[in-house]
Structure formats: structure tokens, C-alpha cells
Image (spheres, rainbow, N blue to C red):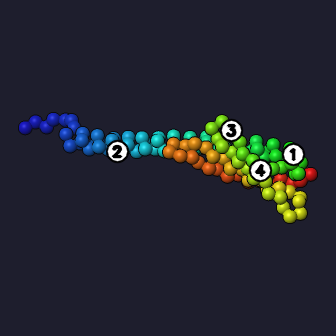
């Protein structure tokens, strides 16, 4: 019997199995990366909205800083202003609620604003 060169069926099946496992791993990683990028973009937008609110409040005298809420595009924003006992600064807490698949995500930001 003459020896022929080539791959056996078992070798081909093992190669296909290894390739399939590798491809499934890549697909899972790609899906996770896509979700993480979307989450990062949402958090970046929420951070920009909170920063804008901080700047609006920072431009006002302490006596005019009050809490409130607003709708900014698809984001719901609410903020509270808490004075210190000596009335020298204000603690500002901003909550940004953004829609996500299957519900909402809440991000909270806090800063201290000195009174002038």
C-alpha cells in the first residue's frame, strides 16, 4: 500500500473545532467591547451635562444657588445645593439619569463651590 500525503478527516475536524472556538471568543469580545464603548459615551455625555450645570451654578452668587431639575435631550438632570454652616461654600450634587437598554442608568456627580 502506498502512503499518500494530506490531512485526515480527524485532523480537519480538530482544526475546524479550534477555529470555531477562537471565532466565538472573538465575537464575545467584540460584543463586550461595543457595550463598553456605548457605556463610556453615555458616561462622557452625563459628565459633560453635570459639568455644565456646575458652571451655571458657579456663575451665580451663593444666595441664588438653588436645586432643581431639567431635561437635557434624552437625559434627566436634577441637582441639590446644600450650604455649609458658616455659609462660605455650597455642596452641589448633580444626578444624571440616562436611558439604557432595559431601563435607566443613574450617574451622580458632586462638587464644592466657594461663595464669593
Mark 1, other Cα within 10 Å: few <14 / some 14–19 / many ≥20: few
- Do the CB atoms of the residues marked 1 and 2 lie less than 8 Å apart? no
Image position, residue 18 (x, y; %):
32, 44
Image position, residue 75 (x, y; %):
64, 41
Identify the mark at residue 21; answer none if there is no mark.
2
User: In terms of sequence position, does the residue under pointer 3 or pointer 2 come before the other?
Assistant: 2
Is residue 36 visible in the rendered structure shown here? Answer: no
- SS of the residue under disc 1: loop
Q: Nearer the viewer, residue 91 or 20?
A: 91
User: In terms of sequence position, does the residue under pointer 4 or pointer 1 come before the other?
Assistant: 1
Q: Nearer the viewer, mark 4 or mark 1?
A: 4
* Residue at image coords 50%, 45%: 102
Q: Nearer the viewer, residue 85 or 108?
A: 85
Image position, residue 43 (x, y; %):
63, 45
Label 4 – label 1 distance at C-alpha: 13 Å
Identify the mark at residue 67; answer none if there is no mark.
4
- Do the CB atoms of the residues marked 4 and 2 lie less than 8 Å apart? no
Label 4 – label 2 distance at C-alpha: 54 Å
Residue 26 vertical placement versus 85 (above, below): above
Label 1 – label 2 distance at C-alpha: 59 Å
Identify the mark at residue 60; answer none if there is no mark.
1
Q: Nearer the viewer, mark 4 or mark 2?
A: 4
User: In terms of sequence position, does the residue under pointer 1 or pointer 2 come before the other?
Assistant: 2
Label 3 – label 2 distance at C-alpha: 44 Å
Could you say which quadrant of the image residue 27 lies in? top left
User: In terms of sequence position, does the residue under pointer 4 or pointer 2 come before the other?
Assistant: 2
Is residue 79 visible in the rendered structure shown here? Answer: yes
Label 4 – label 3 distance at C-alpha: 16 Å
Identify the mark at residue 72; answer none if there is no mark.
3
Label 3 – label 1 distance at C-alpha: 20 Å
User: In terms of sequence position, does the residue under pointer 3 or pointer 1 come before the other?
Assistant: 1
- SS of the residue under disc 3: strand
Amino acid at each position: 500500500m502506498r502512503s499518500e500525503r494530506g490531512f485526515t478527516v480527524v485532523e480537519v475536524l480538530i482544526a475546524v473545532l479550534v477555529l470555531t472556538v477562537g471565532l466565538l471568543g472573538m465575537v464575545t469580545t467584540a460584543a463586550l467591547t461595543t457595550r463598553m464603548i456605548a457605556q463610556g459615551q453615555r458616561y462622557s455625555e452625563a459628565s459633560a451635562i453635570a459639568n455644565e450645570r456646575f458652571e451655571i451654578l458657579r456663575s451665580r452668587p451663593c444666595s441664588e444657588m438653588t436645586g432643581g431639575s431639567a431635561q437635557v435631550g434624552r437625559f434627566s438632570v436634577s441637582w441639590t445645593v446644600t450650604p455649609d454652616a458658616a455659609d462660605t461654600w455650597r455642596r452641589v450634587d448633580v444626578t444624571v439619569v440616562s436611558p439604557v437598554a432595559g431601563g435607566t442608568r443613574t450617574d451622580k456627580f458632586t462638587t464644592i463651590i466657594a461663595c464669593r
